[in-house]
Image (cartoon, rainbow, N blue to C red):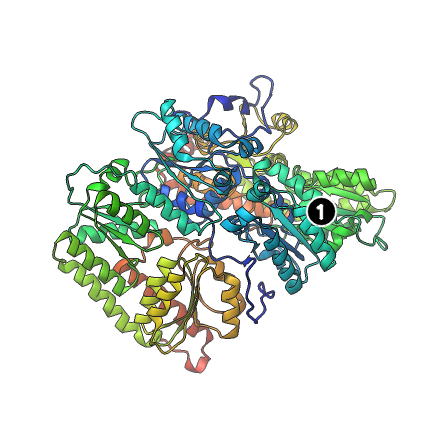
Amino acid sequence: MKTGILEERRDQIHRTGEGAIDIACNRESLAGAVSQRACVFCGSRVVLYPIADALHLVHGPIGCAVYTWDIRGALSSGPELHRLSFSTDLQETDVIFGGEKKLEAALDELIDRHGPKAAFVYSTCIVGIIGDDLEAVCRTMSQKKGIPVLPVQSEGFKGSKREGYLAACKAMFKLVGSGDTSGISPVSVNIFGDFNLAGEIWIVRDYFRRMGVEVVANVTGDGRVADIGRCHGAALNLVQCSGATLDLARMMQEEYGTPFLRVSYLGIEDMADSLYQVADFFKDAAPGIVERTQELVRDELARLMPELARYRRDLEGKRVAMYVGGSFKAFSLVKAFRHLGMQVVMVGSQTGTKEDYAELEQITDPGTIIVDDANPLELSAFIKEKDVDLFVGGVKERPIAYKLGVGFCDHNHERKEALEGFVGMLNFAREVHASAMSPVWNFVPRRAARIAAREQEAVNE
Amino acid sequence: MLLRHTPKEVAERKALAINPAKTCQPIGAMYAALGIHGCLPHSHGSQGCCAYHRSALTRHYKEPISAATSSFTEGASVFGGQANLLQAINNIFTVYEPEVIAVHTTCLSETIGDDLNQIFEKARREGKVPEGCTLVGAPTPSYVGSHVTGFSNMVKAMAQLAEPSGKKSGKVNIIPGWVEPADMAEIKRLATLVGVPVTVFPDTSGVLDAPLTGEYTMFPQGGVTIKELKASGDATATLAMGEWCSADAARWLDAKCKVPCTVLDMPFGLAATDRFIDVLRTVAGVTVPDAVAVERGQLVDLISDMHQYLYGKRVALWGDPDQLISMCEFLVSLDMQPVYVVTGTPGKKFEERIREICAGRPFEVKVKAKGDMFLMHQWIKNEPVDLLMGNSYGKYIARDEDIPLLRWGFPILDRQGHQYFPTVGYRGGLRLLEKMLDQFLDRKDRDDPETSFELVL
């Protein structure tokens, strides 16, 4: 086995401190690479699907609907229509003669039966090839049924997840402005780029409630069509997750003049900093908000820090590698691991930009590997080279980490614990501790010897 | 109530599937290809397909699943994917160094009309395929059939590697169908016990149940080798388990290489295992050893111990045709009542087989090919059952209707260990029985009033 690095990929890998960073990114994956990336459809689907009172119909062969059926624990406090899987299940005859009639019939039946507040119709690769006129069908059905029926132009081959985010934002933007904004407080925000995994958006909403800030719309975790329709009435958009909803924020800024702030609810600094930014924005409109926010952060930290210290004692000096989707997560995670006394030795992302990687280089220690669009062999080589104790990634990376005898934390769709907010930091520490410190790794031949050696070293010191 | 959106009234649906009981072809081809030694499956289509299949297989098998993709872009979709595939073949052999690349198509590459054989020829001509390495290809259009069809198509492509030497090898080919790695291992164990040398393909044992060693390898020890596949044309016979999963490959070997085939039901349960052992004995001309008879006797013994609890229990099952046929037969033989049976995979013959198995029994079976979980839920809402059996997609119904769910089939996304415990053969029957009775008695212990709660059951 060679190093597993394609010659053409060398400029997608950088080591902090070794020359100027110039990562080639946002580049199409090489054909034949075992890439961890997904497609346009995937991007659109993950962004829109948490809107719980909308119908989500996948126009394509069955697979696209099945693989995105309730895979992300995007919780809803009300309707659960988003957790069902609807597909036009295109067959060979549809591919030959077109699927428009079928799509129309499906929408007709579903809208009548389920009475959704809006319908999103996702285009897939095959629809892009056979040329069904999604726009026209949606327009007709919208008129017929009296609800917004929105085409999502998410043909898989038209790029990576990034283009899917944009298609999703375009679809949502058609809803914005349709609702009545009366009664919305001047001290109000929309939460963009949070998908309510494990109930995270409820934690964040509670902080804003305590600060006296009204949340108009969740985009999209625990989302509702009507809220999105009136979200242009909010004073400010808070954008988390650099890729997914930034486009929508930009569209709203242009059309409605709504300013936006980029925030992150992961980790202590970023969480606190995000709340302070909001408080600062509203300090004239809402006297006392800065003090209220300070008090909130103080309260939360007073509860959090002693407990965090217990985990830190064990985790101090342990080494972490991470491979995430969007790089916003990486920034927050690097800082979060610092609180646990852990050392980040590798950071990778599926969809980072040049600016993202430059910023990562700024905040990581010398020697840290920074990589764009990695494959399993590369990940494995880096994990071994850096003698990593914990790997942070998504579903496909978990068993790779385990095979290497390394702890794992899912910071992606399949996380089961809320990791946002101050309480999320504690959950995160617990999860990291549970896996990195598990006695099971002592049974792993490759690592057992090293762990023993490290302990011996500690004793000798 | 997660499924509060399901109305009780069943109406004819033509235009859509709701909560599907199938998925698309390529994932089946990918799973089958993982049963070839040293093989990297390759998805000839957009990146998403490959990522989805890998994620789905990872969630089920809890193992690293490597596969490459042609990473189609807009250009490839207009001008054809040949350039992408050629580049992919070159890159894969250079970087990942597999012995085999097993390419399957997607709806996209099928529709634009890429011809795998022609592209393979070009790759070989251009020296992109290193000495001793192999390309396998299967067409798997996502808009035809289901994941089962894709599995079958890749298995057939494996059979087509056969190069008959004209000399019989004395071995028997066994095509096990889409079962767990542990099932494939169990089939090999039984064959060894009976004393028949076999080639099992595909064979994911040793691939998707590999031990944790602290090293990551893309190509674990297991899998059928290309050498074995080439020799499959010299076998004495082929036993194909499952009409949907395995028959095409077996019939091809029969027609082209004169290897006589027998298409069997998958060996789930007593009777189907009996038939498997019997055919194995016959084609190999051996006597069944006592050890096998003992295993059979143990299964009968456990059934007799349990029969009073199983009697008359109503069961709803969903999954794939071959598995469901054998399981229905097993349940009926236990005096249970498989009242609702759904597969998303098309096939009128499936409905016929299920009706045959249930004919003359004291219940009426509702069976549907090209059905979905929405329909299944509607049936259950109209008249409930005692047990649900199938993949994880039944958990919504289980929760809403408060019915125990025995997870069996593909995919299982929310429980672990299934890849290690066979449910085929007599021993597999023991495991199925234990799991079934646990479901019933755990429920009884939970629900019984204090007055009838007993220590000894």
- Secondary-structure class at tag 1: helix
Which residue is most to the top? Answer: A19
Provide residue A422's location: percent of width, then percent of height: 65, 46
Depth check: B198 or A378 in front? Answer: B198
Which residue is most to the bottom? Answer: B451
The amino acid marked with disc number 1 is Met
Say left or right for A242 vs B300.
right
Residue A224 visible in rendering: no
Quadrant where the C terminus of chain B sits is bottom left
- Residue at 39%, 74% in the rendered image: B313
- Residue at 58%, 24% in the rendered image: A24
- Residue at 74%, 40% in the rendered image: A249
Q: Chain of mark 1?
A: A
Q: Callout 1: few (<14), some (14-19), or many (20+) C-alpha neighbours within 10 Å?
A: many
Which residue bears the numbered disc 1? A172
Provide residue A222's location: percent of width, then percent of height: 67, 54
Depth check: B200 or B84 in front? Answer: B84
Provide residue B39's location: percent of width, then percent of height: 35, 36
Say left or right for B100 vs A203.
left
